[in-house]
Image (cartoon, rainbow, N blue to C red):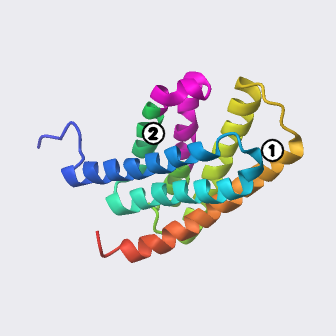
Amino acid sequence: MKKALFPLSTKQIVQIALFLAALLAVEFSTVVAAGAMWLWFAFDRYYCTALIVIYVLCARVTGLRFAVLILGLCEALLGLVFGAAYGGPLFALYPFSEALALQGVFLVTRTNGEDLKADMLGGALFGLVGGIFFLIIIGMWMMKQVLPFWYVGLRLLSIAVTSAVGGYVAYRVGNRLKGVV
């Protein structure tokens, strides 16, 4: 029996491409709020919730075990193209680190977006890893921003909570999409 070199169906490739397009729409819509540090509470609620919903739904709709990692790798490759504006090639690791954290939760819990606890835990870890990477590694270390510790702590808490809420929303939407796609 011959194994396929690339074991994805055309339907799964198209689904991942559509989720990547949705992910890029969310990413580019945040350009409006760039530099507005006082908008972080609204920004976190929109951005973190939307990202985790897209990642979890991609895993659930495609049915692929490593769909989150594939989507994170695609976003990281695009980050290499656009990363010069945000801190160079290290910026490409930002989406991949988030996807790796979420995929790790899915592998440990043996789910693929079908369990509420795993989705919420994965969402919180997704946000926490991404927030630490973006605020501390990119912001404070690469770009030499001086951020007060209370601000970093509040942002990380806000990101983790809103990402967990995003996991809940993804679980609820995934239940509705279960029989449709």
Instruction: For label 2, count other residues whose C-alpha is less than 10 Å away and answer few (under 14), some (14-19) or many (20+).
Output: many
Residue nearer the viewer, 78 or 176: 78
| Residue 45 x/y as whole percent | 65, 60
Q: First in sequence, mark 2 or 1: give its number.
A: 2
Residue 75 tag number: 2
| C-alpha separation, residue under disc 2 versus residue under disc 1 | 25 Å
Q: Quadrant of the C terminus?
A: bottom left
- Residue at point 81%, 44% (across, down): 152
Look at the image and give the residue range highlighted in magenta: 79-101
Residue nearer the viewer, 36 or 18: 36
- Residue at point 52%, 38% (across, down): 96
Tell me if I can see residue 66 in this picture. Answer: no
Q: Quadrant of the N terminus?
A: top left
Mark 1: amino acid: Val
Whether residue 73 is situated above or below residue 151 in the rendered picture? above
Left or right of residue 145: residue 54 = left
Residue 152 tag number: 1
SS at circle 2:
helix
Tell me if I can see residue 137 in this picture. Answer: yes
Q: What's the magenta bit mostly, secondary-structure-wise?
A: helix
Mark 2: amino acid: Glu
- Res 98 quadrant in image: top right
| Residue 80 x/y as whole percent | 48, 27
Asked whether 86 falls inside the magenta stretch, the response is: yes
Asked whether 174 falls inside the magenta stretch, the response is: no
| Residue 61 x/y as whole percent | 35, 62
- Residue at point 21%, 36% (across, down): 5
